[in-house]
Every structure is written in structure tokens, then in C-alpha cells.
Image: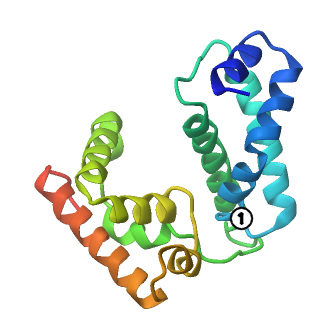
């Protein structure tokens, strides 16, 4: 089923819309959430919370790109759950990929949120296709370095070096745009 038809079903609050959404995107949502949360129970709960959030957001919001919309919601909920789990005196999980970016972006002032988003999008568009894919799969979808190495037929060290160089370019780019890093 086409995304536009699923959006229309959800917009009309048809439960069939959620069923179709789940059929088409459940595996993707599991992948996105599991890349942040390493506990299967938390991941499953987060996917269910994603469906609930989508149900409550459509309507009034009608997304143009359903896949990006649901991935963003799932990733945000997974990060929230990760932070909740890893506060002091709570269960600690494994490392998450965006920790690598933390040192690069720790002191950015996020009061200009849409400007930062636009600058990040512009940065990614300037990268070559391989670097774009590595960056997005690692830092948006949370894919592991070993999985990326396998996908791109590279060594893990090579993937790590490429990601390091992309982060260095990102830091230089954002510094040039006036962000205080």
C-alpha cells in the first residue's frame, strides 16, 4: 500500500491505517529503536509508543514523507527511553552512536533549532553519496559500525576512519557557520 493511502487512512482515524503502517514499517521501526535501546522489552514498548504517537499526531498533522516521519518519532522516543534508563541508579545499556557526536556538538546553542537543522541538511547534501549514506545510517538509523562495514564491504577500521573524518568536516562546517563548538 502506498504511503499516501496509509496517511489518508490514519488521517481519517481508521484502525486499518495502523495495521497497514505496521505491516509496511514495523521491521524498520524495530531496527531504528533497537539501534538505540538494547533491551528487547524497551524496544518493543518504544515501537508501540511510536504507533500511539503517530495515531495522536495524524490528524491534525499530515506528513509529506511517512517513512521519515515515523523514523523521527521512533528515534526520539528511543532516545528519551535511553536517557530515562541511564539516569543515575538505573540500568545502563550499551553505547549509542550519537555519543560519538556528543563531543563535537556538546556546546551548540540549540535556540536556533530550525537554522541548525537547515545547516545540518546542507552539510549532508554536500557530502558524496557514500559519506551521506554512512552518516545517515550511523547517526540517524543508529546502524552499528560492523553492520556498515559489511554493507559497504570495508573493514571496521576503515568505516571508523571515514566517520571520524565526516565528524571533523561537520565540526569545521558548523564552526564556519558561527556555531560555538
> Depth check: 106 or 19 in front?
19
Q: Is residue 118 above or below residue 177?
A: above
On-image quarter of the C terminus: bottom left
Estimate how packed mark 1 is, as few (under 14), some (14 to 19) or many (20 or more) residues with alpha carbons within 10 Å.
many
Where is residue 81 drawn, in percent x and y?
71, 55
Q: Which residue is drawn at the image coordinates 11% and 55% (left, top)?
A: 176
Q: Is residue 65 above or below residue 71?
A: above
> Depth check: 70 or 23 in front?
23
138 left or right of 45? left
> Depth check: 173 or 8 in front?
8
Residue 22 lies in quadrant: top right
Residue 169 appears in view: yes
Q: Which residue is drawn at the image coordinates 64% and 38% (left, top)?
A: 70
Residue 106 appears in view: no
Where is residue 163 drawn, in percent x and y?
37, 74
71 left or right of 97? right
Q: Which residue is drawn at the image coordinates 26% and 58% (left, top)?
A: 127
Residue 112 lies in quadrant: top left
* Callout 1 secondary element: loop
Q: Which residue is mark 1?
A: 37
Where is residue 124 drawn, in percent x and y?
31, 52
Looking at the rendered structure, the number of numbered marks drawn on it comes to 1
Q: Which residue is drawn at the image coordinates 62% and 55% (left, top)?
A: 79
On-image quarter of the N terminus: top right
> Depth check: 5 or 172 in front?
5
Amino acid at each position: 500500500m502506498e504511503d499516501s493511502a496509509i496517511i489518508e487512512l490514519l488521517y481519517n482515524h481508521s484502525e486499518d491505517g495502523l495495521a497497514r503502517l505496521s505491516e509496511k514499517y514495523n521491521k524498520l521501526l524495530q531496527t531504528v529503536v533497537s539501534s538505540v535501546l538494547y533491551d528487547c522489552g524497551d524496544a518493543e514498548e518504544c515501537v508501540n509508543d511510536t504507533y500511539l504517537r503517530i495515531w495522536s499526531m495524524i490528524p491534525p498533522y499530515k506528513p509529506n514523507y511517512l517513512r521519515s516521519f515515523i523514523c523521527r518519532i521512533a528515534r526520539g522516543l528511543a532516545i528519551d527511553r535511553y536517557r530515562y534508563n541511564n539516569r543515575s541508579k538505573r540500568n545502563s545499556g550499551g553505547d549509542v552512536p550519537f555519543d560519538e557526536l556528543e563531543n563535537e556538538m556538546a556546546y551548540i546553542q540549540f535556540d536556533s533549532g530550525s537554522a541548525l537543522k537547515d545547516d545540518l541538511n546542507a552539510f549532508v547534501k554536500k557530502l558524496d553519496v557514500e559519506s551521506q549514506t554512512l552518516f545517515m545510517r550511523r547517526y540517524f538509523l543508529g546502524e552499528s559500525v560492523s553492520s556498515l562495514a559489511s554493507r559497504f564491504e570495508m573493514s571496521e577500521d576503515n568505516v571508523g576512519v571515514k566517520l571520524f573524518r565526516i565528524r571533523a568536516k561537520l565540526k569545521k562546517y558548523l564552526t564556519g557557520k558561527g556555531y560555538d563548538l
